[in-house]
Image (spheres, helix red, strand yellow):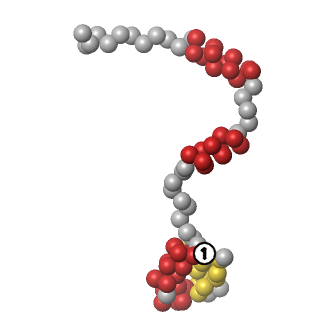
């Protein structure tokens, strides 16, 4: 839910507004003289679960045979890494 509030109200009840954003997921558009100045919204969640990853991978297009051929070709053309002269 997005509420429009005047700047003076936002200043007077800033702590309450932040609590409502954090606890209830509300959003507020702060207005000055009837024009929107900013929006106070909940932060996007930072965690990304294994289930989220699985859903993301399921949503991607499936690779075709040509893709695997390109990958195999790239692997075959990789230069060898020189041995480390500092190791015994």
Find residue 35 and report its horizontal and vertical position in percent: 64, 81
Image vertical order of residue 85 relative to residue 57, above or below: above
The percent position of residue 17, horizontal first and vertical second, equals 52, 81
Q: Locate the N terminus by quadrant.
A: bottom right
Total labels: the figure holds 1
Q: Residue at x 49, y 84 (%)?
A: 16
Furthest toward the front, the residue is 51
Residue at (63, 20) in percent of width and height: 71
Closer-to-camera residue (37/44):
44
- Please say whether residue 51 is visible from this viewpoint: yes
Mark 1, other Cα within 10 Å: few <14 / some 14–19 / many ≥20? some
Question: Quarter holding the C terminus?
Answer: top left
Which residue bears the numbered disc 1?
27
- Quadrant of the image occupied by residue 81: top left
The relative height of residue 44 versus residue 87 in the rendered view (above or below) is: below
What residue is rendered at 46% in x and 10% in y?
Answer: 80
Image spot of residue 21 (x, y percent):
54, 75
Q: Quadrant of residue 42?
A: bottom right
x and y percentages locating residue 14 in the rendered image: 48, 83
User: Viewer-proximal residue, 24 or 15?
Assistant: 24
């Amino acid at each position: 839910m997005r509420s429009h509030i005047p700047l003076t109200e936002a200043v007077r009840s800033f702590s309450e507004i932040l609590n409502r954003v954090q606890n209830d997921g509300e959003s507020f558009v702060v207005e000055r003289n009837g024009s929107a100045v900013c929006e106070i919204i909940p932060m996007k969640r930072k965690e990304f679960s294994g289930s989220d990853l699985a859903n993301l991978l399921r949503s991607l297009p499936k690779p075709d045979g040509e893709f695997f051929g390109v990958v195999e070709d790239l692997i075959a053309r990789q230069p060898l890494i020189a041995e480390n002269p500092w190791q015994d």
